[in-house]
Image: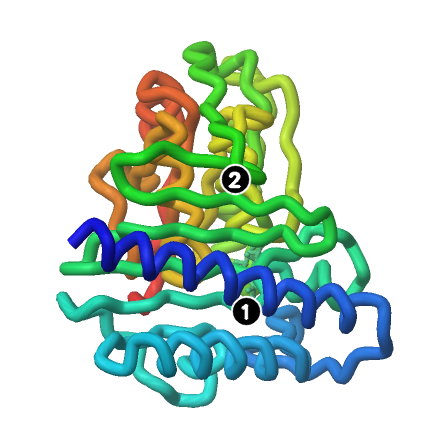
Amino acid sequence: DDQDIQHCFDTAVRIARNAGEVVRVAFHKEKNIDTKSCGTDLVTETDKQVEELIIGSLKKEFPSHSFIGEETVSAGGSCNLTNNPTWIIDPIDGTTNFVHRFPYVAVCIGLAINKKVEIGVIYSCIRDELYTARRGSGAFRNGKQIHCSGLTDISKALVITELGASRELANMEVVNKNFRTVAEPPIRVHGIRMLGSAALNLCSIAEGSADLYYEFGIHVWDIAAAGLIVEEAGGVLLDPSGGPIDLMARRVLAAGSQEIAEKASKHLECIDLPRD
Ligand code: IPD
């Protein structure tokens, strides 16, 4: 019920702040860098340490809940989204930024119940910006309500996308093609940005500082929590094909209006990826 959700929310915020403090301290230090699926898919000791901290703290409070965490899944853990209350965690979204000390890194904590995200907490810990949402209650940055831009003309849009971790050539062809589709006439948007954190890209849509974000190759932990923040800020979250968002399908399109979301989904070429 409502009180339970509020308790989950308060706990998530507290833990995200604690985790963010650990990331912030490690940010300026020497790092031990490793690779995962390929040479551009990075992980550090801090990713693992912070994920253990988050899952450990949540488990103490909610022993019957389920967990999906980026580093646990990388280590062979399950990535099963069931109807059971499931915490979806990315200890450091923007690990490449973290490694390079580019200050866009975020702790992501989402809670899905019956496969629907009910709570989203994103802590941009270097810039000390906390984005939060509860389904049906709006989206907030440091406690102040935020809204999407509502821009409808895609030609006036500021667009965010990413190269993604995998640089497989066949997929890069599509990535580059989509890049040209939005950059060149007739769509020719105002500009294209890459922040290096899917969650903070989504928060940019939520706060109206960008109008469209799309990416192929992300994972459920990159978009679950921040996706709710977009929706609660009045934005649109879709599968890039134009269908409903599928959290496990490794792709996302978010926009500040239905018009831009639909226009983009009509023009973008899609990449099919193995599901989470
Ligand atoms: C990555 C970031 C990046 C996106 C990648 C993600 P990670 O997450 O969100 O912006 O392009 O697809 O994997 O690995 O730093 O948690």
Rendering quarter of residue 183: top right
Q: Which residue is mark 1?
A: 91
Q: Does label 1 point to a residue whose CB lies under 8 Å from ligand 1? A: yes
Residue 203 numbered tag: 2
Dot 1 falls on a residue whose secondary structure is strand
Which residue shows up at 85% across the image and 67% down it? Answer: 28
Ligand 1 in which quarter: bottom right
Residue 268 in the image: x percent, y percent? 40, 34
Q: Is 186 in front, or is 260? A: 260
Q: Earlier in the sequence, mark 1 or mark 2?
A: 1
> 156 above or below 142?
above
Q: Which three-letter amino acid code belongs to the residue tagged 2? A: Cys
Residue 245 at least partly seen? yes
The numbered disc on residue 276 is none
Q: Residue at x 48, y 36 (%)?
A: 140
Residue 56 appears left or right of 210: left
**Which residue appears at 23% of the width and 69% of the height?**
81
The answer to whether 270 is drawn above or below residue 111 in the figure is above
In the image, residue 221 lies at what x, y percent?
42, 62
